[in-house]
Amino acid sequence: MNKVKIAATVVLVFNLLTFTLQAREGKVTVHVVDESGKPIPNIEVGADFNNAMAPGSGWGTGAPTKVKGITGKDGACVLTGSGNLPSVDVGIRTTTQFYGSGGYGVSFTNSFLGRWQPWNSTVEIVLKKVGVQVPMYAKRVWDAQIPSKGRPVGFDLMAGDWVAPDGKGQVADLLFNFARITNGVVKEGPYNRSDNFLYRQLRDNSLTISFSNEGDGIQSVAATGGGLRLPREAPANGYSPKLIKRDFEIATNTVVITSETKVVRHSDFNRDANYFFRVRTKTDGKGDITNALYGKIYGDFGENIGNGQINFTYYLNPEPNSRNMEFNTKSNLFKNLSSLERVSAP
């Protein structure tokens, strides 16, 4: 290709990029209702019409075009703005009466006469009313190294630490038992490629979460969306005394591992997982629960489980027998948490 053709190609590509990044007008209608479907007026709604950076300015997304509006008596608000990317994000901040809600939006499929299509799509947003918010022990556990492999280690939720002698905790609310098997051999310490005497390492990591008292337990729960991620109240029943998670990569057809080895990979860990739990349970002679503490967990335990580390965010209501899970973010019973440990969600 000669220099003239190269120059022409560069100009053509630049013109196409410039055309592609031209801002187009978009329009959405946001309809806001409460959990019973009743329209909510006087709610401020925000929309970000997305923009890419201009050619030559680097990669990534530029500053969006921000538009705000207030819902009317019918709970609707029409927002119009312009952006050069085919999407708009919509959200509502927390108010004194309702939890905020984000993650909504519209992806435009094409444009016509300078307008993004579809034109004026409706986004339905359900807001949850703020109930009785209570103080809690709320903390994000970040890359906490499990002190021992092959035996349960206690974690004190009120102390936010491992049970002595591994930490300052006194009560083993949660028991973590981590095992790491690499190429069929139980390994101590973090993942280490120097262990690899074959072509590659095959892992089989398991984490068992158990409890100290009869009646204690944990159960998985689906997120309900909105500013309050889980239901307002923990369930009274349905708790399992044990939760087992595995993350493995296993050869299926040979002992000697080569580049041709067929490998099955699987992980039970899911960063979007959520749980309710019950701890410090006491029962009477009939086995009925007389006293217990309830809490919730956002996220799963195994972001970095291969190194024997756990990550999760938990909330513990210290009031005996209260199943209220609405956390007052201004009344965390933990003080002086680091930026990584701090919790901001209710």
Image (tube, helix red, strand yellow):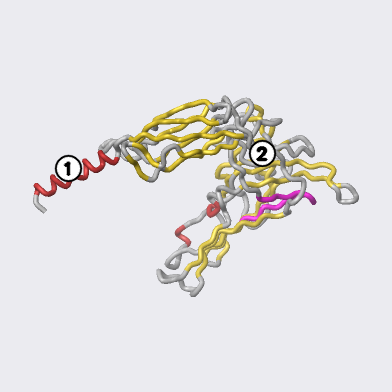
Q: Residue at x 46, y 73 (%)?
A: 256
Q: Few, some or many C-alpha atoms within 10 Å of disc 1 (few <14, some 14-19, many ≥20)?
A: few
- Tell me the quadrant of the picture where the N terminus can be found: bottom left
Cα separation between marks 1 and 2: 57 Å
Between 2 and 92, which is closer to the camera in this rendering?
A: 92
- The secondary element bearing badge 1 is classed as helix
Q: Is residue 331 above or below residue 290?
A: above
Q: Is residue 203 visible?
A: no
Horizontal side of 295 relative to 195 (left or right) equals right
Residue 134: percent from the left, percent from the top?
Answer: 70, 31
Report the residue marked by disc 2: 315
Q: What are the residue bounds of the magenta stretch? A: 207-220
Report the residue marked by disc 1: 11
| Kind of residue sitting beneath label 2 | Tyr
Q: Residue at x 64, y 27 (%)?
A: 97
- The secondary element bearing badge 2 is classed as strand
Give the quadrant of residue 7.
top left
Residue 281: percent from the left, percent from the top?
Answer: 79, 45
* Among the two numbered marks 1 and 2 on one chain, the one whose residue lies closer to the N terminus: 1
